[in-house]
Image (cartoon, rainbow, N blue to C red):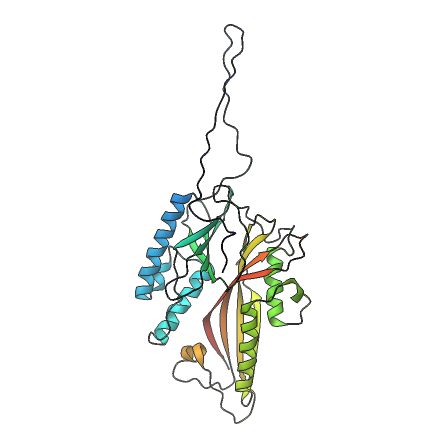
Amino acid sequence: MTTNSWTRRGARTAAAAVVVLSLGACAGEVPQPDPDPVASTPAPVLDEDRIDRVLADIDETIAEADAALDPALLAERFSGPALAMREAEYRLAAASDGEYTPTPLTTDSQVEVVAATDTWPRTVLVVSHPPEGSNLPLLIALTQPDARSQYTVWLWTRLLPGVATPPTANPETGSTPLAGDAEGLRATPDETLAAYAETLNNPDSANAGLFAEDAYKTAYREELTTLAATIEAAGSVARTNEVIPGSIAALSTSDGGAIVVGALRSQLTLSRTVEGATLHAGGSIGTLLGDDTIVENAVDGVYDVTLAFHVPPADSDEPIEVLGADQILVEVVEQE
């Protein structure tokens, strides 16, 4: 992964402001105050010291909760898709008697992208160093829903190997947060997630040309093809994807584009279609089914898929690039 174009920690600048008062020549004239100018743009929502404190607190929460596999310990510092995914990983770890271990998470930061805004919710993106046991960094989205709430881990995803990361604003300046319907991009943030889900559902989708090829989509298609071939003597497989409402956030990049993060709900359905055949569910789905892994009718494996994109500006010829992707099995449902 290349991170040279992202703003790195440690680049700190200082500026001195000089205020000059000009007094009139008339005797007895009362000097008028010359207030400091009001900032024309909002300031970054966190400075270096506050980021360090937030990340340190989150790291302690992760260590304590992971040691106990107790989702209740995550409540103060996790929310949204991140909380749902971590709770699911704890369930899978318990069901597999420790054979499955939760995704290594770290807040050891190498890059931060800080929103500049005076409203809420507020977003900060953190690119971590690779966690222990992994060679890929994480992109972690933190959110603060209101002034009285703490920052929480709202989403994480793994950066894909070989991605070229986009340039972002200096943390002292901050990046503009963008609404889901923000224009001026190849696609709005909302459209980006919806179009990507559509391309997973249908490789021949009209929106397929919006995106560069990426390692997640390639692996997704290969695994689906392999699974279909494996169970064809007993049944069939299908998978559908849709955007999780309220799961999208975006910050501007220096090239006029945006970093967009969001989550999909992905449903993998295994169906027994051959009378008299026996269909077994394997992998994580089989683990959550327990002792009886035979599929009598159909079973749904429900995944949360977290994604990060670089969306170029509208006047660019470059495709939208997937920066990161991760998926966690969050539920298994047997159909009657």
Tell me what residue is drawn at x 40 percent, y 47 percent: 51
Expressed as whole percent of the image width and height from the top left, the position of residue 37 reads 52, 28
Quadrant of the image occupied by residue 92 = bottom left
Quadrant of the image occupied by residue 96 = bottom left
Tell me what residue is drawn at x 67 percent, y 72 percent: 204
Q: In the picture shown, does residue 125 fall above or below 209? A: above
Expressed as whole percent of the image width and height from the top left, the position of residue 83 reads 42, 61
Expressed as whole percent of the image width and height from the top left, the position of residue 41 reads 55, 38
Expressed as whole percent of the image width and height from the top left, the position of residue 113 reads 49, 49
Q: In the picture shown, does residue 93 fall above or below 141? A: below
Residue 248 can be seen in this image: no
Tell me what residue is drawn at x 51 percent, y 21 percent: 34
Task: Tell whether 98 sits left or right of 187.
Answer: left
Q: In the picture shown, does residue 59 fall above or below 169? A: below
Quadrant of the image occupied by residue 48 = top left
Residue 172 can be seen in this image: yes
Residue furthest to the top in view is 27
Residue furthest to the bottom in view is 276
Question: How many numbered tags mark residues here?
Answer: 0
78 or 334: nearer the eye? 78
Task: Tell whether 292 sits left or right of 263.
Answer: left
312 or 200: nearer the eye? 312
Tell me what residue is drawn at x 52 percent, y 39 percent: 42
